[in-house]
Image: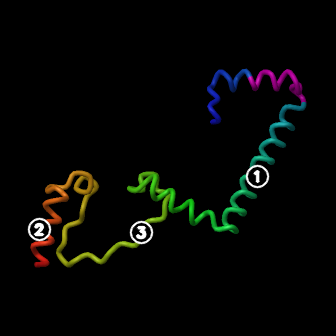
Amino acid sequence: MFGIGGQELLVIAVVALLAVGPKRMPTLMKAIGKTVRELRNATRNLTSQVGLDEVLGDVRDLRDPLNLRGDAPTPKKKAKAPGAKPVTARQLEQPEEGVDLAESRAREDDA
């Protein structure tokens, strides 16, 4: 979080406790939490109104093409041929035959 480690965060918390005092610390933390929550909601609303969420969705697809995080929208699945075996993730990562061989076989079939 912002390049702040655990020790630095502890020092900041101690300094804040000394500066504010233990009686007003819970009130301050509630105010900070409320401000951060309102800021996130405002940012979310702004990005949806402007249309940045669609652009950011495209960027998420580029950063995580296999959708390992599970937060990117999943593309529509193509209809499978009857009797076709399901493709596993391992087969996608390490196909039995190389891409060049598969392409050349597809060209031969088209010819």
Residue placed most toward the observer, 53 or 73: 53
Q: Residue at x 68, y 67 (%)?
A: 50
Disc 3 target residue:
75
Q: Report the front residue among 94 and 28.
A: 94
Binning the other alpha carbons within 10 Å of mark 3 as few (below 14), some (14 to 19) or many (20 upward) gives few
Per the image, label 1 sits on a secondary structure element best described as helix
Compared to residue 108, the image places residue 28 above or below, namely above
Packing grade of label 2 (10 A; few <14, some 14-19, many >=20) is few
Q: Disc 1 designates what residue?
A: 39
Q: Residue at x 30, y 77 (%)?
A: 79
Q: Earlier in the sequence, mark 1 or mark 3?
A: 1
Q: Is residue 15 magenta?
A: yes
Residue 103: where, in percent of width, then height?
A: 17, 65
* Cα–Cα span, label 2 and label 1: 55 Å
Depth check: 29 or 11 in front?
Answer: 11
Dot 2: element: helix
Q: What is the number of the mark on residue 19?
A: none
Q: Is residue 77 above or below residue 52?
A: below
Amino acid type of the residue that numbered disc 2 sits on in the rendered structure = Arg
N-term mark: 2 or 3: 3
User: Where residue 102 sits: x, y (%)?
Assistant: 15, 63
Determine whether, in the image, residue 59 is placed left or right of residue 15. Answer: left
67 relative to 3, above or below: below
